[in-house]
Amino acid sequence: MKFGIATLLLVSGAAFAQNPLPATSREIGQLFAALESSRCEFHRNGSWHSAQKASEHLHQKYDYLLEKGLVTSTESFIELAATKSSMTGKPYLVRCGNAQPVPSMSWFTSKLKELRARPADANSSE
């Protein structure tokens, strides 16, 4: 009987996994757009990649997290997908121009703060 209840709980939990709220999806889309238009480079697993390649990689991670119902906020996307390698645990870095590389978590969090500081009508046009 215990097995049946545990199975039921697992199945019902999976059924309740939801997509993020529209505002969260919009913010994450805006973060992808900011990355793609940034001309910054993205360091992961020992190599520097273009912003476009980084975006492609993070989109794959995002899609996986969505399937698992793990993206509950924009911050959870940053933490789970855009901060470090899932395989090696090594942090991602972002380098823009001649500036020193910064942890990607800092870069994405800063961009998110900028997005949220904009007037609402400016955010809805992207």
Image (cartoon, rainbow, N blue to C red):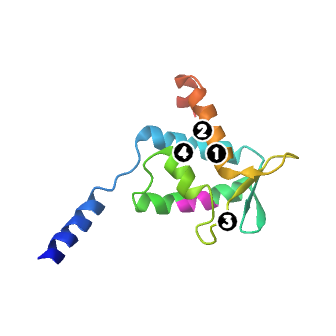
Task: Tell me the CA gap for discs 1 and 2.
Answer: 6 Å
Would you name the residue on which mark 1 appears?
108
| Region rendered in magenta | 57-61
Q: Name which of mark 2 and mark 4 comes first in the sequence.
A: 4
* Mark pair 3, 2: CA separation: 22 Å
Q: Which residue is mark 4?
A: 28
Residue type marked 1:
Phe
**Mark 1 vs 3, N-terminal side:** 3
* Percent position of residue 45, x then y: 71, 68
Chain-order first, disc 3 or disc 4 = 4
Q: Amino acid at mark 2?
A: Leu
Mark 1 element type: helix
Q: Is residue 14 above or below residue 77?
A: below
Mark 3 or 2, closer to the camera? 3
Q: Secondary structure at mark 3?
A: loop
Numbered disc 2: secondary structure:
helix
Q: Residue at label 3?
A: 90
Tag count: 4
Residue located at (64% from left, 71% from top): 88
Q: Nearer the viewer, residue 35 or 6?
A: 6
Residue 10 as seen in the image, left or right of residue 114: left
Q: Secondary structure at mark 4?
A: helix
Foreground pick, 97 / 107: 107
**Where in the figure is residue 5, as x and y percent of width and height?**
16, 70
Q: Are marks 3 and 4 in contact (CB under 8 Å)?
A: no
